[in-house]
Amino acid sequence: MPRIAVVPGDGIGAEVTREAVAVLRELDRDGELGLDLVEWDLGADRYLRTGLTITDEEMAELGSGYDAILLGALGDPRVPGNEHARDILLGMRFKLDLYVNLRPVRLLHPGGSPLKDVSPADIDMVIFRENTEGSYVGMGGVFKQGTPDEVAIEEDVNTRKGVERIVRAAYEHAGRTGRRLTLADKSNALRHSGQLWRRVFGEVGDEYPAVETGLMYIDALATDMVLRPGRYQVIVTSNLFGDIISDLAAGLAGGLGLAPSANLHPGRIGLFEPVHGSAPDIAGQGTANPVAAILTAALMLEHLGRTDTARRIEAAVEASIREGATTADLGGPLRTAEAGAWIRNALHK
Ligand SMILES: NC(=O)c1ccc[n+]([C@@H]2O[C@H](COP(=O)([O-])OP(=O)(O)OC[C@H]3O[C@@H](n4cnc5c(N)ncnc54)[C@H](O)[C@@H]3O)[C@@H](O)[C@H]2O)c1
């Protein structure tokens, strides 16, 4: 029986995770899933209450005692330094070595994109974002802080091992699904890391001769993705560029309220979370879109080998969007709980 740690987290994270868990429990009512869902109290409330973010023992328990983590989002205005989110979320990604940040982006409905004249076939891509290196490792420091001479240095770490394994994961996916793979970098300006990425991309590519490839500078890709999204099927890129370009891609497919993601190390525990954050601007209002969290649950099931059940959830979500049974961010009249209930009901149709 797959064991899932549920970490609702902060703000709308908790609100949307409630709906994702309700979908899983609804499916389990039919005896289909047999999931062991264990709720974990990690987030700003616990940090403010106890001073604890996540302990080494808890991290070890997650890594060895669970098959997956389903996370909402972390981030709370009462913790302006965001240290709890860094310890918990970046801690899981780094300490559990979840080096693949997989971000599928799919237009679920012809009218769902801010672009005109695009169909679902035009926006259907998977972004492989490197998840354990780059500018997010926290290497660097400050000097003369608070003075006019202040210096802040944030190192961008790229290792051969780190680049090779994410590039290989992207080639594997592109090869398996018969899709075109694009490397996005900034090797014209960031020469040292850029050359490493390009060299590795070419070398690993020699092992996948059937995969059609392309190279794009990340800034040019940002424009081209808006003008010709259909050219992009699988994208592999660094931590920072992947963070940004996947938000852009999510926007083209209808917004952050729809975008799921997975943090993976093939063969180990996976961490599944919506791309969006805790949205303090709408937290507590009951208006957050639960779809990204529900599609995240589907992505988790797919990785647990329950592909049919994952497709069933996706079909119910697609129906909700087609019928306009959505929250306000997509122009619909429903509140978070109502949108979740609509999707749960549609599972049985
Ligand atoms: N994985 C994570 O836990 C994660 C990811 C991103 C940001 N954050 C944190 O979340 C906090 C807020 O960050 P932010 O404002 O930059 O990003 P955000 O994704 O929380 O919000 C960006 C905008 O999108 C809207 N939005 C996001 N999700 C939505 C949903 N499901 N339904 C409707 N509208 C939605 C918000 O209302 C906001 O206007 C910060 O503390 C940040 O560090 C956490």
Image: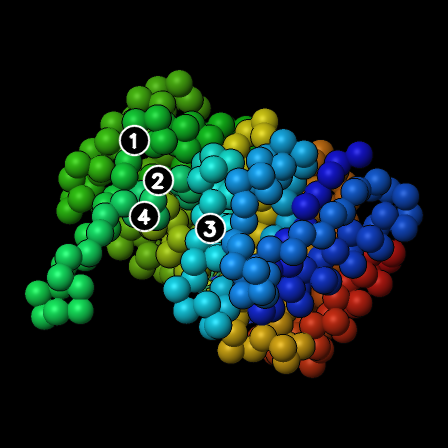
Q: Mark 1 or mark 2, which has the lower sequence index? A: 2
Residue type highlighted by circle 3: Asp
Residue type highlighted by circle 2: Glu
- The residue drawn where x is 47% and y is 45% is 91
Q: Nearer the viewer, mark 2 or mark 3?
A: 3
**In this view of the protein, which residue sits in the foreground, 11 or 143?**
143
- The answer to whether residue 111 shows anywhere in this view is no
Q: Callout 3: 10 Å neighbours few (<14), some, many (20+)?
A: some
Residue type highlighted by circle 4: Gly
Q: Nearer the viewer, mark 2 or mark 4?
A: 4
Residue type highlighted by circle 1: Thr
Q: Which mark is residue 159?
A: 1
Measure the alpha-carbon separation of dots 3 and 1.
22 Å
Secondary structure state at the residue bearing disc 2: loop
Measure the alpha-carbon separation of dots 1 and 2.
8 Å
Q: Callout 1: 10 Å neighbours few (<14), some, many (20+)?
A: few
Q: Which mark is residue 59?
A: none
Residue furthest to the left in view is 149
Q: Mark 4 or mark 1, which has the lower sequence index? A: 4
Q: Which residue is mark 4?
A: 138
Left or right: where 241 falls relative to 88? left
**In this view of the protein, which residue sits in the foreground, 76 or 229?**
76
Q: Which mark is residue 87?
A: 3
Q: Report the quarter where the N terminus lies.
A: top right
Q: Which mark is residue 133?
A: 2
Q: Callout 2: 10 Å neighbours few (<14), some, many (20+)?
A: many
Q: Position of residue 142 (x, y in %)?
A: 19, 56
Q: Position of residue 343 (x, y in %)?
A: 77, 63
